[in-house]
Amino acid sequence: MTTTIAKAAMRDKYGEVLVKLGEENPNVVFVGGDLNKSVMSVAFGKKFPERFFDFGAAEANMMNVAAGLAASGKIPFVSTFAVFATGNAFEQIRVGIAQSNLNVKIVVTHAGIMTGEDGISAQSIEDLALMCSFPTFNVIVPADVIETEQAVRTAANTFGPFYIRLVRPATKIVLPQNYQFRLGKAATLREGKDLTIIACGVLVPAALDAAESLAKAGIQARVLNMASLRPFDEEAVIAAAKDTGAIVTAEEHLKHGGLGAAVARVVAEKRLAPVEMVALPDGYCESGTPDELLVKYHLTPADIEAAAKRALTRKKA
Amino acid sequence: MANHVATSPIKPHSVAELQAKAKVNRRHIVQMTHWAGSGHPGGSLSAIDLMTSLYFRILKHNPNEPKWADRDRFILSKAHDCPAIYACLAESGYFPVDELKTFRKLNSRIQGHAHIKTPGVEMSGGSLGQGLSFGVGVSLALRLDKRDSKVYVMIGDGECDEGQVWEAAMAAKHYKLQNLILILDRNRIQNDRFTSDVMELEPLPDKWRAFGFVVHEIDGHNMQQIVETLEMARTLTGPVAIIAHTTKGKGVSFMENNADWHGKAPNVEQLAQAMKELA
């Protein structure tokens, strides 16, 4: 009997949660830029038209408007595609939100190569580097819809600027129903003594598949879901280096400035261990289906497994 | 504290008192930039008559309670001209006048560009083009909260080069922001040169009208006209744009209408000369 793997889209869940947050807290407002059908904020706008603001294709303006709303006691959720938020409005986020430490929640959809057929202009593969560069921001990369709901709720209930990175297509539901997202904490999804795979976002299911496959070869991999890139769980990385002696990172982003870079920094500073990074190769991708792109650009369970074996070889060397 | 009602403890100044206060503030601006050895005196001096009238007559605000929910907001988008706002804030009691000596120095509360952490400063700036957007957000929040406070946003004329200004202008009209009053310091000089040499802005009033603003042009150094216009503007259905024709470096002869004084500090002799002229 074949089992169907349940999939659901993070942005659909975001849209649902946004409406619930609107019901729970009258200070929650929405700021969008003519992509509301895509970021799933239409339902919020129908239910709370007076708290729904569309600024058209004008991301710079949108970010500072959100800052003004936040400075006046509102909790603005700002949503557009990852590329437009981080690329068009970097300076507005930097001075207007990050340096002011304002309570703005930027929830982007269509992140990374999962945007697929729209091609490289729509594929944000640099956004985590940009957003993790802000010292005041919380940066979250949910693994599935379960974590999306909890991350969005955490953002609403935690003072400070947040960046939450969602993808367009439905993705595997990988976390248990009783999963607890904790800001700044890694979640151990599987125990193992031989090495640790640290993954975030859509590569969390791939990391679990790789661990399963490694187990069949007698290699026990610990798997950490590192959804929170800022604040970052350095202790979990140090423990991984200490307990298992080898680390593989897996993310759907360039190597520069993302999860792998953050892990490597901790390893270099605190506890040496070989680190192998599964990330996008240095360059831009192309149009294609998300699954095709994941294969062509080496972000599959098999790629993680191969990286694990390289890490183990280095560990023994 | 829930039912605490703050009121403005600042006595509304007469035109003559505002003129005298503006002169005091001009001396602060020149001294601050001298002490700091850097900063932006030119645009501070062009804007100071407008800002003095706001802080000492027009704005509903309380230096003892900077975050009073019903205050009017003054948002300085051209945040490099913060010596002007620091002078106004210190003179109205947000922090001691003596603290102006710390401008741009280590551990100071008054930073090189206006920052939201300084008591009385509403927005962090330093990157042009952002203030009107921020003002749109504040204005929307006040409307949601059913507060009748006014939102004043001051921008520079060179700042109008920034496309974001016009994104915000469209939004202000689209959302019918009746409590939003833009004050444009039209001193005709930006960092490098005259605005007309860098990037032609005219017909500037027509541009703001085309974006849906009620436009008034004034002499930004005529205190009587400033006060009359700002008081009248409170009664208008906005968004309103007041284009204030000013002189960069106003009040210090060698700084007036000279782009070199956009971002340069006076030396000892220049300070002495300026203070003599502002005595």
Image (tube, coloured by chain):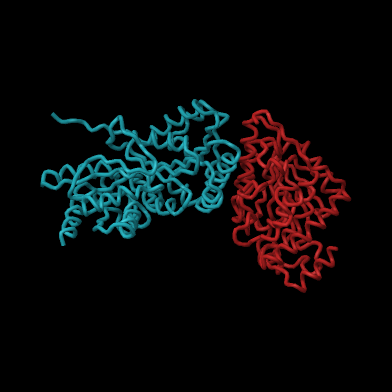
Chain colours: A cyan, B red
Q: Could you tell me which residue is drawn at 26 percent across and 53 percent down?
A: A278
Among the 4 quarters of the image, the one containing residue B254: bottom right
Estimate the x, y position of residue B5 in percent, counting from the top left. 71, 32
Asked whether residue B203 is in view, the answer is no
Apparent side of residue B15 relative to residue A311 in the rendered image (left or right): right
Q: Viewed as shown, does residue B259 lie left or right of A115?
A: right
In x, y percent, where is residue A95? 55, 52
Q: In the rendered view, would you say B47 is above or below A163?
A: below
Residue at the image position 85 percent from the left and 53 percent from the top = B19
Horizontal relation, residue A93 to residue B220: left or right: left
Residue that protrudes farthest toward the bottom in the picture: B269
Quarter holding the N terminus of chain B is top right
Where is residue A31? Give x, y as percent: 53, 38
Residue that sits furthest to the right in the current view: B16
Q: Is residue A43 left or right of residue A53?
A: left
Residue at coordinates 65% horizontally, 33% vertically from top-left?
B143
